[in-house]
Amino acid sequence: MLLLSGSYVVAADAEPTSNDAFNEVITPLFLEHCVACHGIDEEVSGDVDLVTLKQETLVRSPELLRKLIDVLVDHEMPPEDEPQPSDAQRLKVVVTLRDLLHQSVKKDTSYGQAPIRRMNRFQYNNAVTDLFQLNCIVFTLPERMMREHKGYFKPETGRMADVVHVGNRPLGKSQMIEPRLAGVAAFPQDLRAEHGFDNRGDHLSMSPLLMNSFLALGQSITESPDFGPRTVGIWQEFFVPPSKETELHDEISRRLRPFLTRAFRRPVDEKTLERYSSYALRQIEGGTEFNVAMKSVAAAVIASPRFLYLYDTASTDGQQTSIDDYELASRLAFFLWGSLPDETLLELARRGELSLPDVLQSQFHRMMADHKLKRFCDSFPAQWLQLDRLISSVPNPEMFPEFYFSKYRDSMHMMMEPLLVFETVVIEDQPLTQLVDSDFTYRSGHLEDAYGVLKSNEPKGRGGEVEQLTFHRVPVTDRRAGGVITNAAVMTMTSGTERTKPITRGAWMATVIFNSPPEPPPGDVPPLAEKPPADEEQLTLRERLILHRERADCRGCHEKIDPLGFALENYNAVGAWRETYENGRDVDTSGTLFHEHEFHNVVEFKDAVLAEKDRFTRALAGHLLSFALARELGAKDELALDEIVKATAADDYKMQTLLRQVVLSEPFRSKDVPGQSVATTKQ
């Protein structure tokens, strides 16, 4: 069934759309409602000419089909001030276009290709930690916003703790130092795609200079004064010298084989094993101590492209094919654990069993119950919600003095709330609709104070600084709170220093919640001033922004994002509730979501979003699949998203079902890698 209010699914065996259907259904709508701006008199807005468009052209243009479907489903086209097709006509056209999209992607033999990419800093830290079984981290990770204290994260229980203790080290600050290896070289900051994640291949290239840096980094790890039997779990089995009766070459090879298999995520050939074994043996025969030689070879291993690069082996014909079991093990591990596959995954891959549906599902459940799932929760939600923006939020201290206490900011507490809500939904396998409108949340004493509820009583260090934050799970009885949208973190980071920014909030909603980022504004459009000029002081923010959207090239995006942003106007620039502006005018939050769901307050707005839960599910599935594959999604991925949404909806929208369906999806288990992999030629 196809619904204009949510995801639209076409049966896999749908009959091809005939030219008659194209001419009888699509062409009349284009001629009546679209060609005035898209084809007549050489007027071709957005480079889309609908006058000369034929079915054959559309079938060869899946991205154009996606765009046409999206603007019709979202009521973005025709513009709201133009005559509109009836709902029945719009629905029929979308169904026909959707059939054409299905035909188009069925003819496409390949998915989008994730470029060969190196590990990012977070993945590298995890991989090295797991490879050596370290009981500390390798280096500080500024991008990890939340530090677990007292072991609250226990996914095997299926229950999130009611009281949570977390560290207070916000992104880029150093107020709390975790146990780590001393003397380790710096790792370069990873860039992040504008609407993506920091594991994307197009942002993780490798130059010769970087290769030298990684060799120095590997050496600094194994030469750290902390790298020894106290911190290294494999010290006894890998670094301790064997007895004198042992044949040295064979013993080195015996130790290196499982180490290299784990590091390179697949069995090594004898030639590679011999090269590393001989490297260690030459040093020992030259007078180097055994453990020093093994440290040297270990440093070389973690500087190898086969360790650093994440890639799929080349397909024989450059066409789509299933990834092999070792590639599946790596994809699973880096998605859910941000690290190397463990011995269980590698053994199942060796036996060729991991790709069996029952085995794959069993391993998914095992991995979801492992503490290493914390790495997924440390990586995906903060990037999905764009919480790094909160660190640079600096509300005017004269207008919002309550945001600052001592030398800290409320953002230190704010960012934890949506992250803990996300972790709870994952661990407890709650419906993902809780992310929109949860019946619980987590609050510290200081955060309750910021919301106007309680006074803070956080544990202090010797210098008076906050050493840890204690968050309590509390029921949400007022639906203005709850979820990841209306919390103070998001409201603050989408505001300016002195006022809210409805356009920024609307763009965040479109990008994060509905996975439909707006186009960048024209370069010659000046931003709205923080303070209104004298002749606008008595206007509401909505009235001031009306002037901003009068331009024709601005109107389309504003029709999409303005209702999303103004729905949140009752939350001021630091997330506190308000009914009026400073000039005494009432806040007006009314609007219509997707030209279909009217609302007059934020609770009704949440109801409108929940009415579009299939759309939200599809959006979140798209974010997750893009994160898992480290690439942008293409038109061929649309069919997989259809199936993911359908299966998730059938199981009451449970979060773990969504994650499982991502893992079981065809794009997750497929590759399209023409040509030769870099890592097949560099050891």
Image (spheres, grey):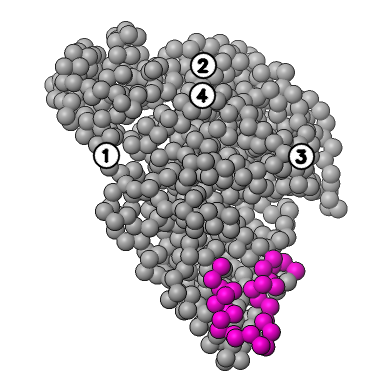
Whether label 2 touches label 4, CB < 8 Å: no
* Residue 182 part of the magenta-drawn span: no
Q: Mark 1 points at which residue?
A: 108
| Mark 4 residue crowding within 10 angstroms, few (<14) / some (14–19) / many (20+) | some
**In the image: residue 552, left or right of residue 390:** left
Residue located 46% across and 26% down the image: 646
Whether label 4 touches label 1, CB < 8 Å: no
Between marks 3 and 1, how big is the CA–CA gap? 49 Å
* Residue 245 part of the magenta-drawn span: yes
Whether label 4 touches label 3, CB < 8 Å: no
Q: Name the residue under label 4.
A: 649
Q: Which of marks 2 and 1 is nearer the N terminus?
A: 1
Q: Which of marks 3 and 1 is nearer the N terminus?
A: 1
Between marks 2 and 4, how big is the CA–CA gap? 13 Å
Between marks 4 and 3, how big is the CA–CA gap? 31 Å
| Residue stretch rendered in magenta on the structure | 230-258
Q: Mark 3 is on which residue type?
A: Val
Residue 232 seen in this snapshot: yes
Q: Mark 2 points at which residue?
A: 611
State the image coordinates of residue 94 (x, y, percent, origin top left). Answer: 31, 19
Between marks 2 and 1, how big is the CA–CA gap? 33 Å
Q: Mark 1 is on which residue type?
A: Asp
Whether label 2 touches label 3, CB < 8 Å: no
Q: Earlier in the sequence, mark 4 or mark 1?
A: 1
Q: Mark 4 is on which residue type?
A: Ala
From the viewer's perspective, is the residue at label 2 or at label 1 nearer? 1
Q: Earlier in the sequence, mark 2 or mark 3?
A: 3
Q: Give above or below for 447 relative to 481.
A: below
Residue 189 seen in this snapshot: no
Residue located 73% across and 71% down the image: 229
